[in-house]
Image: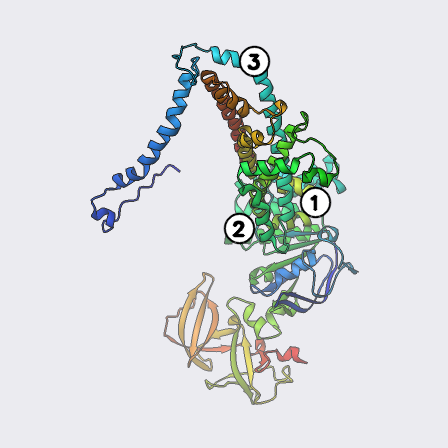
Amino acid sequence: MAHIQLKNISKTFGNHTALTGLDLDIADGEFFVLLGETGAGKTTTLRLIAGLEKPSAGQVFIDGVDVADWGAAERDVALVLQQYSLYPRYTVRENLEFPLKPKIRRLPDAEIKDRVDRAARTLRIEHLLDRKTDRLSGGEMQRVSIGRAIVRKPRVFLMDEPLSALDAKLREALRTELKNLQIQLGATFLFVTHDQIEAMSMGDKVGVLNHGRIIQTGTPHEIYNNPRDTYVASFVGSPPMNLIDGRLVNGRAVMAPLNFELPFAGGAKASGATEGRPLVFGIRPEDVYLESGAPVEARVHDVENHGVEKILTLRVGDTTLRATVPARTDVAIEQPVRFAWNPDKVVLFDKGSGVSLRHAS
Amino acid sequence: MATTMITTLDRSSRAAARGLSDISIRNLFIIPTVLFLIVFNIFPLIYSLGYSFTDFRASTNAPANFVGLQNYRDLLNDPYVWSNFAITAKYVIVSVVGQLLVGFGVAMLLNRDIPLKGLITTLLLLPMMLSMAVVGLFWKLLYDPSWGVINYALGLGNFEWLADPKMALYAVALTDIWMWSPFVMLLSLAGLSAVPKHLYEAAAIDRAGPFYTFFRITLPLVAPILMIAVIFRTMEAFKTFDLAYILTSQPTAELISIRLYKMAFQEWQTGRSCAMAYIVLIMVLAITNIYVKYLNKVKER
């Protein structure tokens, strides 16, 4: 159990800057998800906390102590990597025992056996204990890696995309298991992923990382409903938020190049939104709905059927926007439809900076 | 791999134009080699097996008489031959273990990011590329009691490295270690660099110390390639001749191959030396077989 703090961390590899001025605060017992695209600096952040890399500038605190001079062993963290780094030639049991057996902190045999058995039970790999690791499937290997992390009872669990090499079914199952495990252990988890579904479904808190900077931290709900800028808006959510250029004229949203108008309710909320200023209107696809009397006419450009719902791509002029509609909605491609949005759900972004007006002040 | 791959000749190729079929091209490549092997290896091997049952002497015109297993019986009951075998065993163990320790140790030192790593590796490989005879002559000079560099550097006065009955064999082994440690180093380096880096990181995270990491991760993963080095070096050390022959004439350093040479070409006991050669051959085969079995076991683990 530990509280982790990163203060103004920067990390460069030669000419390449991986992280710039990163601040992060992970509370004790929190499931924190670091979300970002490949190359955003997620893994570097993790390795800095684990002590496998040294920051070029800034400090790492674990439980309020600056751990700059501590090696990976002293930090007492567990790391689960994407390429399940199991020790070859050993059985599952030997792999699980590995972190408990070094002479310096050798535990009594009964204790080792007890911990291994308990971890195996938690992860449901008891039947694999005597098997060699090269004869396991991907999901089993990843469970063993996680098992090797939990037998030690470390202060912090660090997970570097542990699920991304697995197939979709297994990923879903392990997602739930990991979340349950964290609740059960009450441990601090830092989970790195590029998959926004994982972030949304598992995280107590999510930090969105882009180009070595934290763009926004918050609960999944905050990140989803109140994205700090257009990057977060378009990165989180599947399909992503619709972003349409426009202006606010007399309490109505006027889309600039297309000349269609929609009512806008939050005049008071968007206090910084002066009339006529160039804006980007953000609206989630599920807040766009089709209705016969709705104000804007569009054509159906594409239909994706997802079983419970359909994702429509609507075309107005030469702009497209997505709408999530119930699966029973009967539409054909090129069919003219009329749509509207939920005016309460619209997020306004500044056209120039991309920052949400709600976060600007 | 049960599938055999047969590549068919491209019909438009020049070979096809000359009327060569796949089979005739195959024969063109294989038959010279097979002929060479038969004439220079297999025929002498079988011919000498025949001689090993006779009292033939190549130095006289006397006809060879069949003596059955007499040669083998005599040799295996000869305490001098057994002492040659004991000397050879000692030599093999000292030199192979020495090469293993030095070679693997240097490989461990080199297996990290150091400046000029390529140059250092190449320089370290040089001894291996010299001729055995040249190495023998050089080291004879280095070992020289009165003006040799080794005595000078170690301040040993007039110590007789190669004439001392106790030291001679170790002096030869030392030269062999100098010459062939780079070979073990090269194989070990290949093995060490094949150990995935993330395993070391995982071990560091798991709070394993350097010794624990070495014995639990590095060694098991490098073991198979190390075994291959041991097989090669044991076979080579077993049949060492030139180095020992050039360096010393001490009877305490008389390896089995030197005994064999003396028997065949100084005493001209051709029949008996053939029998001796067969005994050595069988021993080398047996040792190699044990190693290979063990290697397979190491690989399976």
Q: How far apart are the two marked residues, 3 and 1, measured between alpha carbons?
A: 51 Å
Label 2 – label 3 distance at C-alpha? 71 Å
Identify the residue position indicated by label 2 in the image: A170
| Disc 3 target residue | B78
Q: Does residue B18 appear in the picture of this structure?
A: yes
B119 above or below A95?
A: below
Of the residues tagged 1 and 2, which is closer to the observer? 1
Q: Give residue B36's quadrant in the image.
A: top left
Give the crowd class for mark 1: few <14, some 14-19, many >=20 residues within 10 Å: few
Q: Secondary structure at mark 3?
A: loop
Residue B161, position as x, y percentages in the image: 67, 31
Asked where in the image residue B238 lies, by quadrant, the reply is top right
Residue, far right: A65
Which dot, 2 or 3, sits closer to the camera?
3
A214 sits to left or right of A249: right
Give me the disc on residue B210: 1
Q: Amino acid at mark 3?
A: Asp
Q: Chain of mark 1?
A: B
Location of residue B192 in the rendering, given as x and y in whole percent from the top left corner: 59, 45
Name the colouring of the figure.
rainbow
In this rendering, is residue B153 above or below A235? above
List x then y, in percent, for residue B230.
56, 34
The residue at 72%/33% (across/down) is: B158
Q: Nearer the viewer, mark 3 or mark 1?
A: 3
In-image side of A266 versus B270 (left or right):
right
Of the two numbered discs 3 and 1 on the same chain, state the one appearing first in sequence.
3
Tell me residue A190's x, y (percent): 66, 58
Q: Chain of mark 2?
A: A
